[in-house]
Image (spheres, rainbow, N blue to C red):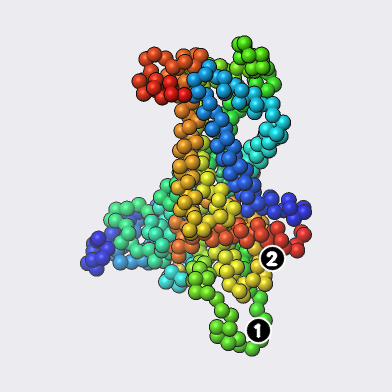
């Protein structure tokens, strides 16, 4: 084994890969969330579909997409490799085990939380990414603009999916899992890289909490909004609360 | 608190103790009753009482590790009621007192559980894996020449303090026992950062961390998930900051050392 493989398969090396990919995925979440906020725009999906078209066709984005695939791939692979090693380190368990008295639940259940995210990811990618990129069975935007008429109407696909109750449930459950995953993961990623300084750690810790809540609540708000307050075309229903009506009409 | 009163009432307790005759035989939890335990006793003294009872009854006494009984040697290693060294923060088992328990309590006592720490007998475990990690690099090779002058090597106070904090690790293994992954990272990090902080440790800095981590992995300890059970259960309060230092030391050693293997 060369020094590189030896380093990357050591217990610390695997965690370094975990943290680098995990923090990279955090940056992806920011882009994904900000882009998706266009779902809330009241234009029948024009902005969102144009954005999706750009993301799906721009060569630079398509290249970075591979980095994203690798990021997920390595993160998930190392998750299983580490979990196996960690489980094997204690063959005989305790009769009594009071870990809740010395640590946070999230930190001890990253694997379970990650697995829920993974299940979500498969469904999510199949339904939107696969159908847009490979299956090509999405409705088209149509309309008079010749340039955009041929774009996939991903907006409509999203909005109609978000009217299926179990789909909304899966999304919300996955976002809760993601929130807890990041609650521990954000800070943990810095710690793994050795970026723990008594001056900055408190800041990183609370930034992580804010990040976890904002990102997961942000993503969860989308299925909930469409399920509760709009019809299948994304128009706000007339019996939605006045507050929603006025916020929606502002965009 | 009842315990601060020397006339406090003696307690009767039920103990669930792991009994295992030797390494190769599977053990089991066995229930014992102990009577008239003074709240002033240490936990190990309470076990002495149990063992005396067992000896009188002609039964094999419970084997457990201990030496100084002053909280400094790190020999005592009991997993009590689901926690390393029991319920009290910042203490070793030998410094845990029975006043922390109440009359009628049931106390579960188990050995440290980690594949790298095989059970010798009952509650006594073999922690020589730690010794082998130290042998791999947890030392400074000094040339024993003449006696150097005091303060010849200037060390800033805050660095000296931090190195000392790390050096207080007594190697008891509570971190491994409490960790969900049975990871030895807190122990190794205390040893690595102690020596990395001091000028005397600099010459062997890179090979030390490389070799110690290699040995740690070879012994079969788990990796660190930054859960923090280790630091919370550590009797001397070694902090997680040391693990960050260890990771930094490891990454920079691997990136810059001349070791190609
Ligand atoms: C967008 C999705 C995800 C993000 C942003 C993310 C982020 C992170 C971060 C920042 C960490 C901390 C790394 C460290 O402790 O150094 C982490 C740890 C972890 N992740 Fe993820 N993750 C994601 C998806 C997943 C998935 C799909 C899985 C599993 C199949 C997973 C499993 C784990 C596990 C098991 C750990 C803990 C590893 C350990 O400390 O032993 N994650 N994640
Ligand atoms: S017996 Fe020495 S520390 Fe407990």
**Considering the numbered disc 1 on the image, is that residue within a helix, a strand or a loop?**
loop
> Residue sitting at 60 percent across and 68 percent down?
B196
Chain letter, disc 2 residue = B
Residue A79 in which image quadrant? top right
Q: Compare residues B222 and B23 and report the one nearer the observer.
A: B222
Q: Is residue B80 above or below residue A216?
A: below
> Residue sitting at 45 percent across and 47 percent down?
A206
The residue carrying mark 2 is B207
Q: Compare residues B13 and A198 and report the one nearer the observer.
A: A198
Q: Is residue B46 above or below residue A237?
A: below
The residue carrying mark 1 is B144
Q: Quadrant of ligand 1?
A: top right
Query: Are discs 1 and 2 less than 8 Å apart at CB?
Result: no
Q: Is residue A133 visible?
A: yes
Question: Which percent across, then down, holds residue B154?
Answer: 56, 79
Using residue B103 as the reference point, say whether residue B109 is left or right of it.
Answer: right
Asked if disc 1 is less than 8 Å from ligand 2, the answer is: no
Using residue B92 as the reference point, say whether residue B189 is left or right of it.
Answer: right
């Amino acid at each position: 084994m060369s020094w590189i493989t030896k380093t990357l398969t050591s217990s610390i090396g695997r965690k370094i890969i975990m943290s680098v990919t995990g923090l990279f995925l955090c940056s992806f979440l920011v882009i994904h969330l900000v882009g998706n906020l266009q779902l809330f725009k009241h234009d029948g999906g024009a902005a969102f579909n144009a954005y999706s078209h750009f993301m799906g066709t721009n060569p630079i984005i398509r290249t970075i997409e591979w980095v994203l695939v690798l990021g997920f791939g390595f993160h998930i692979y190392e998750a299983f490799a580490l979990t196996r090693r960690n489980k094997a380190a204690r063959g005989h368990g305790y009769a009594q085990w009071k870990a809740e008295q010395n640590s946070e639940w999230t930190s001890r259940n990253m694997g379970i939380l990650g697995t829920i995210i993974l299940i979500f990811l498969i469904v999510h990618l199949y339904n939107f990414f696969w159908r847009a990129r490979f299956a090509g069975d999405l409705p088209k935007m149509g309309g008079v603009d010749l340039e955009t008429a041929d774009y996939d109407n991903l907006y409509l696909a999203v909005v109609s999916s978000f009217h299926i109750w179990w789909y909304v449930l899966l999304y919300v459950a996955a976002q809760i899992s993601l929130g807890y995953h990041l609650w521990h993961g954000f800070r943990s990623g810095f710690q793994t890289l050795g970026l723990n300084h008594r001056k900055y750690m408190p800041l990183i810790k609370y930034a992580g909490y804010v990040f976890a809540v904002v990102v997961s609540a942000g993503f969860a708000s989308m299925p909930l909004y469409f399920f509760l307050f709009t019809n299948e075309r994304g128009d706000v229903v007339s019996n939605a609360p006045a507050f929603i009506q006025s916020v929606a009409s502002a965009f | 608190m009842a315990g601060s009163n020397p006339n406090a009432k003696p307690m009767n307790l039920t103990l669930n103790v792991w009994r295992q005759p030797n390494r190769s035989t599977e053990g089991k939890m066995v229930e014992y009753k102990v009577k008239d335990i003074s709240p002033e006793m240490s936990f190990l003294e309470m076990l002495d009482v149990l063992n005396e009872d067992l000896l009188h009854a002609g039964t094999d006494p419970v084997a457990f590790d201990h030496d100084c009984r002053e909280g400094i040697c790190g020999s005592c290693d009991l997993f009590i009621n689901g926690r390393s060294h029991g319920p009290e923060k910042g203490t070793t088992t030998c410094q845990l007192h029975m006043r922390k328990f109440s009359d009628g309590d049931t106390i579960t006592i188990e050995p440290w559980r980690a594949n790298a720490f095989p059970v010798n007998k009952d509650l006594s475990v073999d922690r020589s894996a730690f010794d082998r990690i130290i042998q791999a690099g947890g030392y400074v090779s000094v040339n024993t020449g003449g006696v150097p002058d005091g303060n010849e090597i200037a060390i800033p106070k805050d660095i000296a303090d931090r190195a000392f904090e790390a050096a207080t690790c007594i190697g008891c293994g509570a971190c491994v026992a409490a960790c969900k992954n049975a990871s030895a990272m807190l122990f190794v990090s205390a040893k690595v950062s102690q020596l990395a902080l001091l000028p005397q440790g600099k010459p062997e800095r890179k090979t030390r961390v490389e070799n110690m981590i290699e040995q740690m992995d070879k012994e079969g300890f788990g990796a660190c998930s930054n859960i923090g059970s280790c630091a919370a259960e550590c009797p001397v309060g070694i902090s997680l900051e040391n693990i960050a230092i260890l990771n930094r030391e490891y990454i920079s050693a691997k990136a810059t050392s001349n070791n190609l293997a």
